[in-house]
Image (cartoon, rainbow, N blue to C red):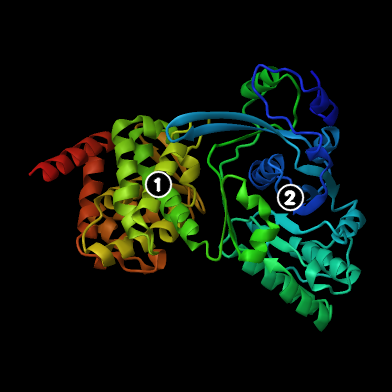
Amino acid sequence: MTILTQELVRTAPRAALPVAWPTAEMLALPEKVLQFGTGVLLRGLPDFMIDEANRQGVFNGRIVVVKSTDGGDATAFDRQNGLYTVCVRGVDDGKPVEENVVCASISRVLSAKSQWADVLEFATSSDLQVVISNTTEVGIQLVNEDIHLTPPQSFPGKLLAVLYARFQAFKGDASRGLVVVPTELITDNGRKLEAIVLELAHRNDLGSEFIDWLESANNFCNTLVDRIVPGRPDPATYEQLQTDLGYQDELLTVAEAYSLWAIEGGEEVREILSFHSTAQGVVIRPDITLFRELKLRLLNGTHTLSYGLAHLVGCTTVREALDNECLARFIHNLMLADLLPGIPYAVDEKVGQRFGMQVLDRFRNPYLEHRWMSIAMQGTTKMQMRNVPTLLHYYQQHQAVPHYMALGFAAYLLFMRNTTSAPGVGHGESNGEPYTIIDDRAGYFADLWARVSPPELTTTVLGNTALWGHDLTRLPGFADCVSQYLTQLMEEGAAATLVAFFTKKSAAVNS
């Protein structure tokens, strides 16, 4: 089978599946972006969005990618002239979405290890405007190092070396600063990266003029990225897609239909990141807290309060849960009736409802296998970060028990019933089937379940300020409600508890 290359693009074969091919003009656009990382999230979100803008004659720039290690997919990029296919699969407004795009936004991939001189040379290009990164959450860390190494060890060290080379080449010209857009999944990623780079500049004695230029001429933007990009599908699906497309693509990537790239910045940032005007899902605002809160509380928070119940019912994936009438109703109402009103940030109800419906579309995506056991990993920490602030704010606003949250919390407590075999690893059993719990608090729960009754366990856990930062037993009625649901789950099972839950809700509404 023919490999995806620029030559293949020029001949554009007729395929069984429709394909959006790049134009010859797109393959010759100037290099405007330096990107650290080759992972599927970058290829499926920012790189895809830049390609989308280029197709519409906006931004008109390509990406030079820096790979930290040799081997792997770097050679595939060379063989394919930087081209790769994104197969978009998902649900939008309840309708299936299938789209196949050959992305041409990447011009070349450089090895940091063996081609660092080429990276620094590109740093002095007059076309360069933007730096993008995704080096995982541990990539934005301070390492005390000499940034003149070839290359520096850390990503902030590499970025500082690039900026210093640029400063020297353009003699401190303030107009030659860059917009730095990290996509690592940490809060205030841009601000944290800037602080580390500044600290490294001081430790390397790079001079006050450079440090002034670093602070005044460059924009480090906080960002939030949100798109599920599984990458290459399972072998059977991968082979079928290649057959239908009519060519071989080692970098073929599957992505969901939904996408969000929220970037914090003003007019200068908007002008340089011009792709925001055409690329669907790019939002540039002075404050992106709203987007962070919606994702954390509605998407992530719903996951965390649902995995226990879904697992106890016997669902393996999120999609299976949405196919279960009672679970689907629980997830919908949990998100929009309890979590949305509890978000500790001012959210327009219509905006929240719209976001919630998009989340439900994503949960129903028939092309993704999002497993509840993956969502459950380190669930106690996730519960504290995602749901406790929402619970507290709900009480401030309503002074009433959020029953969907209470049932979800009870199911979490039952899910955490286990015997431990190693630190952070527990073994539970549900519906006669064993399962493994990956949670730093597995031992804590194993000890409690072994020696106290369920009502006492509920009170002890909810009152543990070391877990939650607050004594949740002080919330009127919450502990009693959680305890009742926990007892019901243990005595009647999760499926019957859900049926009874909604029967009681219906009776209350009709009374």
Check the picture and name the quadrant holding the N terminus: top right
* Rendering quarter of residue 149: bottom right
The amino acid type of the residue labelled 1 equals Arg
Q: Position of residue 148 (x, y in %)?
A: 88, 68
Q: Please give the name of the residue rendered at 72% of the width and 30% of the height, measured from the top-left corner.
A: 21
Q: How crowded is mark 1: few (under 14 residues within 10 Å), some or many (20 or more)?
A: few
Q: Is residue 31 above or below residue 322?
A: below
Q: What element carries label 2?
A: loop
Residue 69 to residue 147: above or below: above
**Image location (x, y in percent) of residue 205:** 83, 80
Q: Can residue 279 be seen in this view?
A: yes
Query: Local crowd at mark 2 within 10 Å, few (<14), some, or many (≥20)?
Result: many
- Above-or-below relation of 342 to 72: below
The numbered mark, 2 or 1, whose residue comes first in the sequence reads 2
Q: Where is residue 368 in the image (x, y as percent from the top left)?
A: 52, 33
To which residue does mark 1 refer?
Answer: 354
The image quadrant where one finds the C terminus is top left
Residues at marks 2 and 1, CA–CA distance in whole angstroms: 32 Å
Cβ–Cβ below 8 Å for labels 2 and 1? no
SS for callout 1: helix
**Residue receiving disc 2:** 37
Can residue 366 be seen here? The reply is no
Q: Work out whether residue 168 or residue 496 is closer to the camera in this orientation and state it.
A: 168
Residue 445: % across, % down: 38, 54
- Compared across the picture, whether 159 is left or right of 362 comes to right
Name the front one of labels 2 and 1. 1
Q: Which residue lies furthest to the bottom in this view?
A: 208
Inspect the image, locate mark 2, and give the three-letter code of the amino acid beneath it: Gly
What's the mark number on residue 83? none
Name the side, left or right, on which 203 lies relative to 385: right
